Image: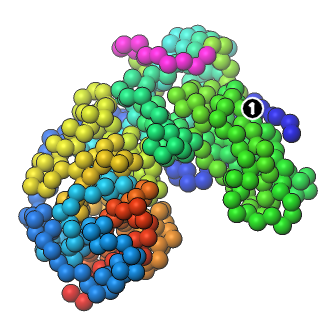
Amino acid sequence: MTLAPALSPTAVSPPAPASRRLRLRTGACLVACAVLPALLGAARAQQPPPAAGPLVPPAALAASAPLPAEIDAAIARTRLPREAFALLVADAQGGPPRLAHRADASVNPASVMKLVTTYAALDLLGPAYAWGTPVTFGGPVDVDGTLQGDLILRGQGDPTLVAERLWLLLRRVQAQGVRSIAGDIVLDRSAFVLPPHDPAAFDGEPSKPYNAAPDALLVNFRSAVLTFIPEPTTGQARVAIEPPLAGLRLPAAVPLAPAGTDCGDWRGGLRAELADPQRIAFAGSYPASCGERQWPFAPADADGFAGRAIEGLWRAMGGRLAGRVRDGRAPAGARPAFVFASEPLALAVRDTNKFSNNVMAQQLFLTLSLQARGTGSVDASRELLDRWWRERFGDAPPPVVGNGAGLSREARLTAAGLGRMLQAAWRSPLMPDLVASLPQSGIDGTLRRSQARQGTAHLKTGSLRDVAAVAGYVHGADGRRMVLVAVVNHPEAAAARPVFDALVDWSARSVLTR
């Protein structure tokens, strides 16, 4: 097996989209796109919530309402104790619960916590808010296209700087006449103040993208994507990586498995070696029956990933770098050559919730304190979100938000409290943005394989080793909507999924027959 460099020095076209990649537009945006929404969002945070009728008190939502016979039977079939369930179904416009079971119990909601983070971000920052990444030249650009100084990128928490958009940023640098950098590429990540992160601490899976840590200069979710393309005539499968990573050795191909080999556990069959940040190797083979497949993973050198991706893509685009990539600070008062703007917050919220993207949720969470205080930190964002919750839903116990993504054993909320937030969101002008971000049953996102009736619900899902949860809205044919919250905390929580489908179907019929 020969090793080929992971870079293509002559490549000048943008990288191909990876699986489950953000679908991001490529239109240019003025600097005002990054600045004006931030000012508007700050003003919005000072305003009271939109006027609406009184919310149903949490005590009323938590009041016991009997389980319908079919839901009770569905729970019985799981053989899980009823005490493991916290359930709520109520009219989105208000009124007593149609169904409530342990709705006031404090439970771990897993990724359903993203509903709190994303709605708070929409409310405090505004759906048009955009992140801006200032790009500063540390010297003049001479007639030969050489930047006589450093290229400085100052991260401001943009969660959407995936490979395609990083390519656009670097093309913008080249459009300023820069072909060669005489100095270094300097990465300023000081906007977030974060504790040390061990990607293996949560579940011992450091290469899983869901364990990636937030970063003020987050590139491609701190993850890369391997692509395998079988070529039966050569007996091999070609291997490619996105984004290209500087200094990485990657096999150009892997052998195909014997003819007739089932696709099955194709990743296990490759026997990949991913622990060395300088080299990826495969001791196994790839089944041709799989066709083309992609494998997202978090490289071992997480803190060095952004620099390697930026250098790798810069060189792949034909750019030259005399120095190195390093962390540093943008000079105080330096005027950026341009500010690279993200797409609006509403689109980031959609991708966060549709695909339950943990690191995007953490970026949104940290942005709350970054915009309010000039620096993003976990403690400051928890304090801000807690205050927001008390101002908006004062008599509902505030959630324990953890890192804002739900990837936590300590996160807690009540079904009644979340139900109240969802009722308020339904009557808010932000309702379309929040609902559009939720997976639709049997259609897309994390609900594409749901067995509930297709299109009857928009629900955020949550799943941990001992947690299963859904929460959102169920739609009736008569146009009325119900809020649904269902959380199970139990070592066999995954067995509760049929109960969730039954709840969706019952809620849809309940609306019709009310």
Q: Is there any visible trace of residue 177 in the rendered image? A: yes
Quadrant of the rendering where the C terminus is positioned: bottom left
Q: Nearer the viewer, residue 321 or 109?
A: 109
Residue farthest bottom in this picture: 513
Residue at x-position 30% and y-position 82%:
72
Q: Position of residue 260 (x, y in %)?
A: 84, 67
Quadrant of the rendering where the N terminus is positioned: top right
Please say if 406 is above or below 473.
Answer: above
Q: Nearer the viewer, residue 32 or 344?
A: 344
Q: Is residue 271 magenta?
A: no
Q: Find the magenta span and give its range.
A: 324-334
Residue at x-position 39% and y-position 76%:
79
Q: What colouring style does the render use?
A: rainbow
Q: Quadrant of residue 64?
A: bottom left
In this picture, residue 502 sits left or right of residue 230: left
Q: Quadrant of residue 421?
A: bottom left
Q: Nearer the viewer, residue 189 or 111?
A: 111
Secondary structure at numbered mark 1: strand
Q: Quadrant of residue 502?
A: bottom left
Q: Position of residue 80 (x, y in %)?
A: 36, 72
Residue at x-position 59% and y-position 11%:
183
Please say if 438 is above or below 75.
Answer: above
